[in-house]
């Protein structure tokens, strides 16, 4: 084949190829709805009371049809059929115009009436301690309006504008109690409210009367100027929140420190201004209601209650055996050291590198329940000894963790030895050191189970002794009396004129004091509802 013949063949092929393409294009163009009015579909749009007729290309969407009819839809408006539907036959499109409106209503929250028994008032008399004030709750409703007809009305938001203030009426009861002069300030928690005793046991005043203190944290600052406490929370995923109130400021209001979910530990740092250490948990729907973070944080606030620093000392960690329950911390009197205790160990916090340095490995106690035992720990006044409860093994049982034996020990820092002071005190011995530091006037108080091998459910005696274990004496209850529920007793603060110390504790819902001068127990309150006390 010559070159000329090859070119003629190629030209013939291209001529017929382009002819076919042009023919197909023409046929396609003839079938397009844009060019043939006969392929348009009639549409009727009903917009409330308006009817609009329009023609749209075959296969257009409802939204396209509305755009052709120059009808705009609002954000909540809807159509029938839906806007994404394709139109292939005559159709009526119905628009439902939807809008929402918000309206607010203020509702009065009636104040509650609380009565407090007081043995310092004559029986039958009453005293209005605090007048009640109604609160105000603002409710925001969301109204849904369709084609100018309201179809639903629901609560959108509820906000407390003003907290209700309960009326507190003090009622006199027959009083066998002799007033006692006391040093410092003694705070106590009763029925979710905080009260304060100063100078003598007749001088009492309410501090917090909201009724929502949960008692997880209840601590006076070292100088007695502030009260640190936790309140129950109604916020989702929040068990409670941490607050302070100034006790020296008239009409002071509680201040939220914006720290939440605190179960085991929050305490003042001695010799520091407005500095708090605390540890947190994460709420859980299953028992016990949380998963411990086993962390440790330092919070500092200024004179106005504003938090100026909230920093981590120990990051969230597993917390050892039974770490889900949580770790407790214990600050030395000089604030130079921080001890920690958890079900399997007692040790010191290494603040420089954010770690925990174990001193003693403990035999964990198997509770077979949704709680874990954490040993009580106390520092000696000079910070050289840690007093702690140790879980002791018991011969003859197959499961060492089930041993019912617990001893009170002293650990001599920095490296031991561990000295047993008292055998079989029970798991809730909670050692507590007095504040007076004169020779032979410093006492170590602790609880001793009446039934030491059932100490989980036993009541306890209150015992004192010298820190070396000598001069031991049971000071409560008196012979034939009922024992105490587990608690850490508190000691009166040391003053320059102190010639005696008082140890304070809760017995059958009331505050009792015992003086080291005569060791005689004296009942101070008759409320029968007291659950926490502190004394600074």
Image (cartoon, grey):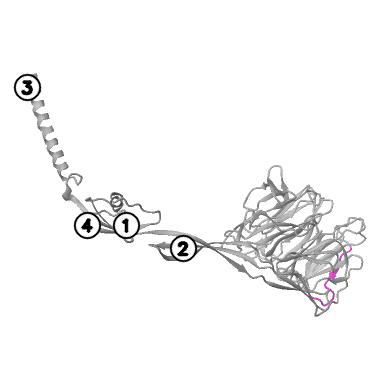
Q: CA distance from mark 4 to mark 2?
A: 35 Å
Tag 1 near tag 4, CB within 8 Å: no
Q: Residue under circle 1?
A: 82
Left or right position of 25 against 465: left
Q: Which residues are magenta?
A: 471-482
Q: Residue under circle 3?
A: 5
Which type of secondary structure does the marked residue at label 1 adopt? loop
* Mark earlier in primary sequence (3, 4): 3
Q: Nearer the viewer, mark 1 or mark 4?
A: 4
Image position, residue 260 (x, y; %): 64, 56
Q: Nearer the viewer, mark 2 or mark 3?
A: 2
Q: Residues within 10 Å of mark 4 (few under 14, many from 20)?
A: some
Which residue lies at the image location 22% right of the left edge and 57% below the top edge? Answer: 90
Q: Nearer the viewer, mark 3 or mark 4?
A: 4
Q: Residue under circle 2?
A: 143
Q: CA distance from mark 1 to mark 3?
A: 63 Å
Q: CA distance from mark 3 to mark 4?
A: 59 Å
**Residue 529, placed above or below residue 227:** below
Tag 2 near tag 3, CB within 8 Å: no
* Mark earlier in primary sequence (4, 2): 4
* Mark earlier in primary sequence (2, 1): 1
Q: CA distance from mark 1 to mark 4?
A: 15 Å
Numbered mark located on residue 90 in the image: 4
Tag 3 near tag 4, CB within 8 Å: no
Which of 356 and 315 lies nearest the eye of the viewer? Answer: 315
Q: Residues within 10 Å of mark 2 (few under 14, many from 20)?
A: some
* Mark earlier in primary sequence (2, 3): 3
Which of 13 and 117 lies nearest the eye of the viewer? Answer: 117
* Mark earlier in primary sequence (1, 4): 1
Which type of secondary structure does the marked residue at label 4 adopt? loop
């Amino acid at each position: 084949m010559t070159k000329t013949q090859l070119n003629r063949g190629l030209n013939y092929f291209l001529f017929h190829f382009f002819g076919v393409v042009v023919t197909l294009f023409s046929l396609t163009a003839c079938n397009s709805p844009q060019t043939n009015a006969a392929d348009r579909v009639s549409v009727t749009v009903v917009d409330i009371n308006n009817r609009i007729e329009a023609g749209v290309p075959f296969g257009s969407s409802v939204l396209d049809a509305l755009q052709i009819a120059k009808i705009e839809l609002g954000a909540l408006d809807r159509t029938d059929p839906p806007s994404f539907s394709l139109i292939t036959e005559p159709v009526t499109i119905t628009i439902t115009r939807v809008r929402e409106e918000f309206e607010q209503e203020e509702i009065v929250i009636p104040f509650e009436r609380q009565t407090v028994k007081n043995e310092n008032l004559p029986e039958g008399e009453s005293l209005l301690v605090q007048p009640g004030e109604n609160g105000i709750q603002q409710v925001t409703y969301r109204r849904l309006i369709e084609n100018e007809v309201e179809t639903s009305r629901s609560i959108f938001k509820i906000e407390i504008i003003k907290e209700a203030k309960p009326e507190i009426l003090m009622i006199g009861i027959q009083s066998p109690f002799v007033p006692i002069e006391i040093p410092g300030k003694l705070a106590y928690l009763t029925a979710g409210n905080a009260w304060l005793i100063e100078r003598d046991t007749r001088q009492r005043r309410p501090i917090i009367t909201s009724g929502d203190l949960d008692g997880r944290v209840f601590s006076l600052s070292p100088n007695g100027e502030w009260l640190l406490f936790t309140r129950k929370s109604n916020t989702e995923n929040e068990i409670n929140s941490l607050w302070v109130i100034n006790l020296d400021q008239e009409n002071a209001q509680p201040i939220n420190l914006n720290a939440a979910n605190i179960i085991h530990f929050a305490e003042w740092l001695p010799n520091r201004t407005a500095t708090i250490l605390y540890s947190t948990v994460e709420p859980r729907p299953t028992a016990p209601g949380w998963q411990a973070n086993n962390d440790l944080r330092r919070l500092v606030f200024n004179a106005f209650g504003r938090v100026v620093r909230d920093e981590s000392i120990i990051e969230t960690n597993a917390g050892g055996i039974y770490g889900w329950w949580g770790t407790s911390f214990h600050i030395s009197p000089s604030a130079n050291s921080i001890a920690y205790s958890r079900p399997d160990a007692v040790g010191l916090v290494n603040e420089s590198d954010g770690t925990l340095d174990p001193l003693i490995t403990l035999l964990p106690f198997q509770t077979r329940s949704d709680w874990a035992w954490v040993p009580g720990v106390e520092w000696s006044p000079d910070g050289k000894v840690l007093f702690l409860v140790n879980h002791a093994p018991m011969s003859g049982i197959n499961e060492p963790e089930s041993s019912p034996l617990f001893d009170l020990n002293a650990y001599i820092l920095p490296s031991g030895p561990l000295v047993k002071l008292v055998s079989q005190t029970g798991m809730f011995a909670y050692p507590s050191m007095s504040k007076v530091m004169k020779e032979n006037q410093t006492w170590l108080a602790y609880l001793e189970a009446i039934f030491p091998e059932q100490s989980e459910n036993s009541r306890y005696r209150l015992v004192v002794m010298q820190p070396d274990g000598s001069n031991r004496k049971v000071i409560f209850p008196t012979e034939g009396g009922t024992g105490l529920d587990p608690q850490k007793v508190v000691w009166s603060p040391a003053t320059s004129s102190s010639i005696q110390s008082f140890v304070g504790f809760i017995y059958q819902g009331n505050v009792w004091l015992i003086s080291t001068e005569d060791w005689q127990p004296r009942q101070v309150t008759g409320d029968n509802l007291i659950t926490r006390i502190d004394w600074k």
